[in-house]
Image (tube, grey):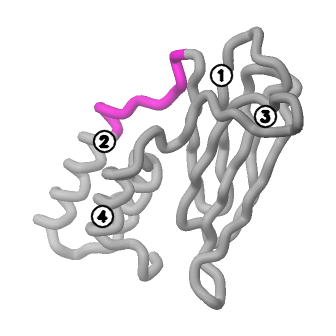
Amino acid sequence: MTVFDTETMAELCVRQGLYDQAVDIFRRLSELTDDATARLRFETRIAELTSTHAPGPAEVPGLRVTTRVDEVEVEWRLPPETPAPMLQVLLLRRGAGGIETDPRSVTLATTHGSTVFAVADLCGVRAAAGKLIDGGAFVPLVRFPDRIA
């Protein structure tokens, strides 16, 4: 458990569309609490989030980000005719001086697939999949999260 593992932080993750991160925080809170009422509240919230926010980018374009302890998996689906597909990921990590950013760009060999990034002390992720156009500019076709509250 970290100082960021609070019910408020979990709900903030929900508002930002970061459901996997919210569920992870609620699970840690549930495991560590001795209060039966709080444990039930956390477990109920986990059930709500996992039933209403099923994984997988079914649509095209689609982008799914799954976070684990020290890694992030990004799955993308772009239209088959997308030229020069690219993935841009911004990893937010806790560092000695506060939150640090770790931007990564990956040229994609295919218009659908997944990749894993190893990252310690993860506290947030932003991602976009899209294409490169003339002059090397990146044009996002799908973003994660798709909205910021």
Q: Nearer the viewer, mark 2 or mark 3?
A: 3
Q: Name the disc covering residue 30, or none.
A: 4
- Compute the Cα span from label 3 to label 1: 11 Å
| Residue range (magenta) | 50-59
Dot 3 alpha-carbon crowd within 10 angstroms: few under 14, some 14 to 19, many 20 or more: many
Q: Nearer the viewer, mark 4 or mark 3?
A: 3
Residue at x 35%, y 38% (from the top left corner): 50
Image side of residue 103 versus residue 7, left or right: right
Residue type pointed to by label 3: Met
Image side of residue 87 versus residue 77, left or right: right
Whether residues under marks 2 and 3 lie with C-beta atoms below 8 angstroms apart, the answer is: no
**Mark 3 falls on what kind of element?**
strand
Q: Name the disc covering residue 77, or none.
A: 1
Q: Nearer the viewer, mark 4 or mark 1?
A: 1
Q: Which residue is situated farthest in the top direction here? A: 81
Above or below for 99 versus 126: below
- Compute the Cα span from label 2 to label 3: 30 Å
Q: Name the disc covering residue 86, or none.
A: 3
User: Upstream in the sequence, badge 2 or badge 3?
Assistant: 2
Q: Nearer the viewer, residue 143 or 59?
A: 143
User: Upstream in the sequence, badge 2 or badge 1?
Assistant: 2
User: Upstream in the sequence, badge 3 or badge 1?
Assistant: 1
Residue type pointed to by label 1: Arg
Image side of residue 57 versus residue 86, left or right: left
Q: Does the magenta segment cover residue 38?
A: no
Q: Which residue is mark 2?
A: 49
Q: Which residue is situated farthest in the front direction here? A: 135
Q: Nearer the viewer, residue 83 or 33?
A: 83
User: Upstream in the sequence, badge 4 or badge 1?
Assistant: 4
Q: Nearer the viewer, residue 54 or 109?
A: 109
